[in-house]
Image (cartoon, rainbow, N blue to C red):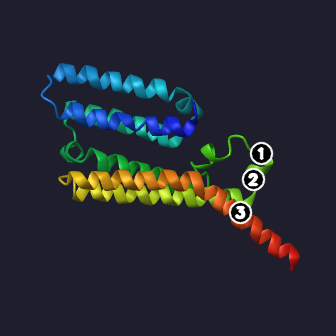
Amino acid sequence: MNNLLKVVLSFIHWGLYSYVMHTALSVQTKFVCLCLLLVFIVIVNRSLILQGEPITICNLFNFFFIFLNYYFNWLTLLSHYPASFCYAMLAVIALGSLIVKKLFAMKYAGQSLSGEKRQHFPFYEINKYIALVWMNVFVINGVINYYFSWAIYLHLVSLGFIMIAIIVSKYVPGVMRNHYRNKQKTISIV
């Protein structure tokens, strides 16, 4: 299965988590459902976790921490705004990958590329832009979920931003690659 598809699948459990938390199930039934969701996350993303993929590991940590917080009620703010916490953590991971210049987007971008092509400047720049887009989407969605958690239609806006980031991740590399190729052609002509 494609790694990007696995990462997208790793976010499905948040919808199920929200559904389980807002039902009238007993605490034991909720606990069993959340344990099954945790097992689902680990099974679907086993290879990414073993590779040390930061977004997937952050997602797993967030789910586990929010799961424990629900039962032990450590932080009431976290109980009210779990999505904002997750988006904040994901934004921190994206920012950290930009700061240390080990971009998380590179793991998905060039799986079929040789090591030589992965070292080219345009490849790094393309992945930097993709990481910036994802970081901004995480920040915007975190703010939307914190300040407007009551507005259900704004959750659709959050999903829209995620879809935009997925489209950018899919199509911007080709556009940027063509831009750099055309730039190289004009430099070589002159």
Residue indicated by mark 3? 178
Establish if 3 lies above or below 78: above
Q: Which mark is residue 119?
A: 2
User: Pointer 1 and pointer 2: residues touching (CB < 8 Å)?
Assistant: yes
Element type at mark 3: helix
For image coordinates 44% across by 41% down, the residue present is 58
Mark 3: few/some/many CA within 10 Å (<14, 14-19, 20+): few
Q: Position of residue 53 (x, y in %)?
A: 55, 39
Which residue type does callout 1 highlight? Answer: Gly
Mark 1: few/some/many CA within 10 Å (<14, 14-19, 20+): few
User: Pointer 1 and pointer 3: residues touching (CB < 8 Å)?
Assistant: no
Find residue 115 and report its image quarter: top right
Quadrant containing the C terminus is: bottom right
Residue indicated by mark 1? 115
Q: Residue 32 or 101: which is nearer the viewer?
A: 32
Q: How far apart in space, not on screen, are marks 3 and 2 (Cα)? A: 18 Å
Q: Which mark is residue 181?
A: none
Q: Residue furthest bottom?
A: 190
Q: Residue 69 or 112: which is nearer the viewer?
A: 112
Q: Position of residue 25 (x, y in %)?
A: 15, 24
